[in-house]
Each structure stands twice: as structure tokens, then as C-alpha cells.
Amino acid sequence: MSAMSGKVVHNVFVSQCYLQNRQFVGTQYRRDSCAPYVRNLLPFQGGKLAWTGISSMQLRTLSKHQGPFVNRGTVHCNVAPTTSAVPAIDKVDFLKLQNGSDIRGVAVAGVEGEPVNLTEQVAEAIAAAFAGWLVEKKKADGSQRLRVSIGHDSRISAQQLQDAISRGIAGAGLDVVQYGLASTPAMFNSTLTEDHGFFCPVDGSIMITASHLPYNRNGFKFFTNAGGLGKADIKDILERAAVIYNNFTVEGLTNSKEKASASIRRVDYMTIYTSDLVNAVRKAAGNIEKPLEGFHIVVDAGNGAGGFFAAKVLEPLGAVTTGSQFLEPDGLFPNHIPNPEDKTAMKAITQAVLDNKADLGIIFDTDVDRSAAVDSTGHEFNRNRLIALMSAIVLEEHPGTTIVTDSVTSDGLTTFIEKKLGGKHHRFKRGYKNVIDEAIRLNSIGEESHLAIETSGHGALKENNWLDDGAYLMVGLLCRMLV
Ligand SMILES: [Zn+2]
């Protein structure tokens, strides 16, 4: 595809060479899915309603929704090289793995100058450290075993890291519930969902993702029912992990592999999460079963974890999703970087909307905490324009409220929010967690805020527990289309 960047081409090439020489854990890796130039778009089906543009839509109530969703049955592409023996334990600088409130590292070898520092042993130590942190946090007295859910995006190192994380959690005496392919927001939701059949709510949750970074990276995000862990907690966990790691022995690691399986369960949690999203739209539309009937909406998941949105959310609501692209998980991201801030990615979804004469296009990042939209005329709603659109939606329901954004937003946006919409624009430090925390702080000191949104596409609503959920933002958009 002409839209591919040189860097991605390079990565695909390196990775293919790498993968060909290795043994694979899984059997579902499809070699053909790596071919970046051979993508067949689904044929266009006509007969949709004309869409008059997002700007003209009536912006109304965003219905309350606390959704969990997940999936696990369709874990296709999580294949990674494996080793049968436990290798010698290398020295690792754990604090270097911290990236704000996330953990990020290199999980796949083969890119020059990027040695692997997120090994299985490192992941196991970090998971054991999180387990210890969680037991202290929850003041668990031993009468009940704590539960931790684990999910991952489409990266090729996902499976091996999921196994390592599971061993770390199980080895610390906690129960593990694996969700397989999932979105980051779904993982947080699993700490809130009340459903004993799905072992919910869980006490803690780990998402294995490196968002839009290249295929060789991976990382972790952690949640409790109080939200995502912040910088200080991540530092604490990494310091604990370093101590645990230094006490690892080859024998101990081998034993933990054998022991772990007894405390691991698997559930299809994305089903719960997606059905909550579907119900939110139905409710907002006045309890109509298929409120999107007649709408043609194309989705671009960039081969990340967001493909569920077409088949599990839009189609049950009646929308036609023909022309949706890159829905299959493929951790080599052969088509474009899954990133709504990326020009090539936005061009790809815009083209898909125009080619299919669709009413709307929706694009997600790899782990679906960020999103953007494209209207029927090809206008992009990402960065400042997405903030403007979401501000208009929120300010209609909450007149005069404060919109918190990062510092790199435009002056034009301030004028729009304050002069046109009658709201207040509060700029704050970059970093989605900073922006969200600032909105929570403002509310705590009596300044009402309902939306925290970063230029990158991370947007969190107060009504959704301040969770930055790209799928929920787009559901909010759909709700406004219908009223
Ligand atoms: Zn992300």
C-alpha cells in the first residue's frame, strides 16, 4: 500500500526474516497476513442514507454507560518466538522500563540498536511485583484470593508475555483470568463489572500493549477499580520487580511454569463489554433495536485490537460496515500504524469513507483507548477538531463546564470552546493521565468538568468513570447522530 511508511516497511522486512528462523508458540499465525501490498477491500454495497456531515448533527445526551467488553475466542495473531529452556538471567535496569504511567520495552529481537529488555523473566517479575502491590493496596487478609484479569493487543509478543505475566501473578498466590485479545478500556472495566460468571469484578487488571509503537515493542498498563495506576505506583512496582528479579533462580522459574496453570481461567469478557456499548446506543436512541439501520459506517482498526467494533457493535445496531478495513489482528501492522494522530492512517480511513460513499469513518489506535472520525465528505475529526466536536457534545449537556486538554491545543480551539460554546478551556500538562487527573482535581475543588481530552485522541468523560475509551467516545458520537 502506498500509504506505508519506510520505517514500517523496514520493520516488516526485519520481522519476517526474524520470524522465519524461529519456532512459534502458536499455530494460528498466518504468514500471508504479513503481505503489506495485498489487501482486498470488501465490495461496496450501496443503498445508504445520505449523511449531511457531523457538524450539522444534533448533539444530545450521551447516555450513561458503564461498559465492559472483551473478546477472547478470536485470538488470531499472537504469535511469538519462544524458547524451551529458561535462559540465564541478565542484568536489567527496571526503572528504564517506565514511560510515565505505563511500562514500555523492547520485546522482540531483530531491530538494530534495540536490544530486548522486556523478556519473559522481566515480565514475570513485574507481574509478581504488581501482585504484591495489589495485596497491600487491597489489604487482603488471605480469606479471599485476589483476582487479576489479563488482556493484550495484537502484537506478536503478546502470547509469550501473557504467559509470563500469568506465571508472575499465579506464583504470588493470586488468581488469573485471561481475556485474550482485548482493548485497554475493557481491562479497566473488568474491575467494575458485576458478573460472577465472568469472575468479575476483578481486583486488578493488566493490559499488555505498547499502543501505536512499532511491532517489536510491548508494555503494560495496570488498573484497579480506582482507575489506571499513576507514575509513583509504576515506579514502586518496578523497584519491587528489580528485587524479585534478582532473587530469581533458574529452578524457581521452571517450577513456576508448572504451577501456574492451576490458577488460570479464560473467559470471553469482550462479549460483555461490547453488549454494554450496544445497549448504550440503543438506550440513547429510545430503545430501538437497530437504530443505525440505513447508516453506512466504515471502521479502520489498523490490524490492532479494535476490529470488534464493526461486527460486535455497529452491525448489531443495524449499520452497514462494508468497506471496513484492517480489522484482523496482525501484530506486524502491515497496512499503517494504528494511530489516529498519524497522517497516513487518517488518509487510509478517509479514502475508505470516500471510496465506499460511507456516512462516517471510525479509526482506532492499537489498544482502542484512542479514536478519531471522518465524516461523509472526508473531513477528519482528530486532534483539535475531535476535541472541538466532543466539547460541543459535552457542553450541550453540561452548559458552561470546563474542558481540560493538554497544552498543545490550538488558540482557535480556545476561542471555539469559550466564545462559541460558552464553556471554559483549561489547558494542562501533556500526558493523558495528567489531563484526566487535572479534571478530577478540578471537580474535587468545586470546578465542574465533564471532559478531559488530549490532542493524541485520548478522551475521558466523567460519566464513564474518567476512563479514556476510544470506543466509548465513538459511541457517544453515534448517540448524537440519532437524536
Ligand atoms: Zn493506545
Image (tube, helix red, strand yellow):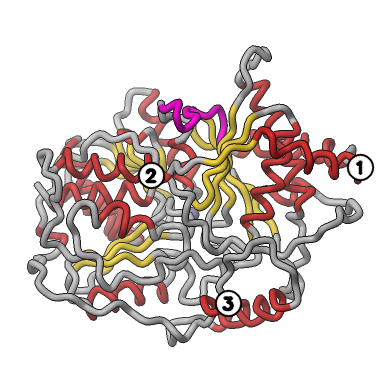
Q: Position of residue 206 (x, y in %)?
A: 58, 41
- Labelled disc at residue 271: 2
Label 3, secondary structure: give it.
Answer: helix
Task: Write down the region rendered in magenta.
Answer: 195-205
Of residue 56 and residue 48, the one placed in the foreground of this image is 48
Image point (37%, 47%), residue name: 459
Q: Is residue 202 magenta?
A: yes
Q: CA distance from mark 2 to mark 3?
A: 28 Å
Q: Is residue 360 visible?
A: yes
Q: Position of residue 261 (x, y in %)?
A: 70, 39
Q: Position of residue 111 (x, y in %)?
A: 71, 74
Q: Position of residue 405 (x, y in %)?
A: 38, 47
Dividing the picture into quarters, in which one does residue 40 lie?
bottom left
Q: Tell me the kind of residue under disc 3.
A: Arg
Q: Is residue 404 depicted above or below 294 in this figure?
A: above
Image point (64%, 27%), residue name: 134
> In the image, is 110 to the left or to the right of 1?
right
Label 2, secondary structure: give it.
Answer: helix
Label 1, secondary structure: give it.
Answer: helix
Return the disc, 2 or 3, that comes first in the chain's sequence.
3
Q: Is residue 382 magenta?
A: no
Return the disc, 3 or 1, that comes first in the chain's sequence.
3
User: Label 3 belongs to which residue?
Assistant: 31
Q: CA distance from mark 3 to mark 1?
A: 35 Å
Q: Tell me the kind of residue under disc 2.
A: Thr
User: Label 1 belongs to which residue?
Assistant: 251
Q: Is residue 296 depicted above or below 312 in this figure?
A: below
Q: Is residue 61 depicted above or below 380 in this figure?
A: above
Q: CA distance from mark 1 to mark 2?
A: 39 Å
Q: Tell me the kind of residue under disc 1.
A: Glu
